[in-house]
Image: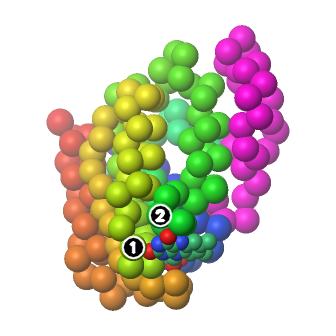
């Protein structure tokens, strides 16, 4: 079983990445093969609604998303991480979600296990979680869990939120347990 973690924060080694790493570590300890991808420093252009993917089943935008498409298709389980920005997901997370439009028609992500970890500055993550739930539902992915870590705006602050970190670890354990079934 192969679990992909994607940190959709523009900040390298920040709170989102910490959350996703904790999930992946727990999944690895439970027997999964894991890989972490960060969108920090990557170029993921927004979907331009050309709809050429309807015909070609490919995205014509030639950027770092092309590599992520391959990884998404290969993964059995995917743990997405996003920081909470203005009570919702980061621009990087939304760009990635929109760019999966090419998978919608043929439901290429169908039945993959999916989870989301949100790193907040203390605010309520409900809107960000809803964005991902909607994405998972539209793509017919199976929701394996949700974790929220509450820190501050400071890099690393989420590590002090023991409940949040435990939530991230439980997420990784659960998704790897489910993949064993
Ligand atoms: C542009 C921006 C908007 C933010 N908006 C919120 C917010 O609405 N609520 C909140 O609790 N934290 C907010 N934060 C704080 C981040 O969610 C928080 O610092 C998070 O841990 C950052 O994760 P990172 O270290 O992976 O970037 C915001 C931070 C930035 C840079």
> Which residue bears the numbered disc 1?
123
**Few, some or many residues within 10 Å of mark 1 (<14, 14–19, 20+):** some
Query: Within 8 Å: ligand 1 and the Cβ of disc 1?
Result: yes
- Numbered range of the magenta stretch: 37-66
| Image location (x, y in percent) of residue 140 | 38, 27
- Does the magenta portion include 129? no
Badge 2 marks a residue whose secondary structure is loop
Identify which residue is drawn at 54% across, 66% down: 85
- Residue sitting nearer the eye, 110 or 147: 147
Badge 1 marks a residue whose secondary structure is loop
Query: Within 8 Å: ligand 1 and the Cβ of disc 2?
Result: yes
**Above or below 53: residue 27:** below
Disc ID at residue 16: none
Quarter of the view holding residue 133:
top left
Disc ID at residue 87: 2
Is residue 23 in view from this perspective?
no
- Residue sitting nearer the eye, 154 or 169: 154
């Amino acid at each position: 079983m192969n679990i992909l973690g994607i940190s959709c924060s523009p900040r390298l080694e920040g709170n989102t990445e910490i959350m996703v790493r904790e999930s992946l570590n727990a999944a690895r300890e439970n027997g999964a093969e894991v890989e972490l991808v960060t969108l920090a420093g990557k170029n993921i252009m927004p979907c331009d609604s050309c709809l050429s993917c309807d015909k070609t089943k490919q995205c014509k935008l030639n950027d770092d998303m092309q590599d992520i498409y391959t990884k998404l298709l290969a993964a059995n389980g995917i743990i997405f991480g996003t920081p909470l920005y203005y009570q919702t997901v980061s621009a990087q997370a939304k760009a990635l979600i929109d760019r999966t439009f090419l998978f919608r028609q043929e439901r290429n992500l169908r039945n993959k296990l999916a989870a989301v970890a949100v790193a907040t500055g203390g605010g309520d993550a409900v809107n960000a979680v809803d964005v991902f739930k909607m994405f998972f539902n539209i793509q017919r992915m199976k929701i394996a869990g949700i974790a929220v870590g509450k820190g501050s705006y400071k890099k690393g602050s989420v590590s002090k939120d023991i409940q949040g970190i435990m939530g991230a670890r439980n997420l990784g354990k659960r998704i790897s347990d489910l993949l064993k079934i």
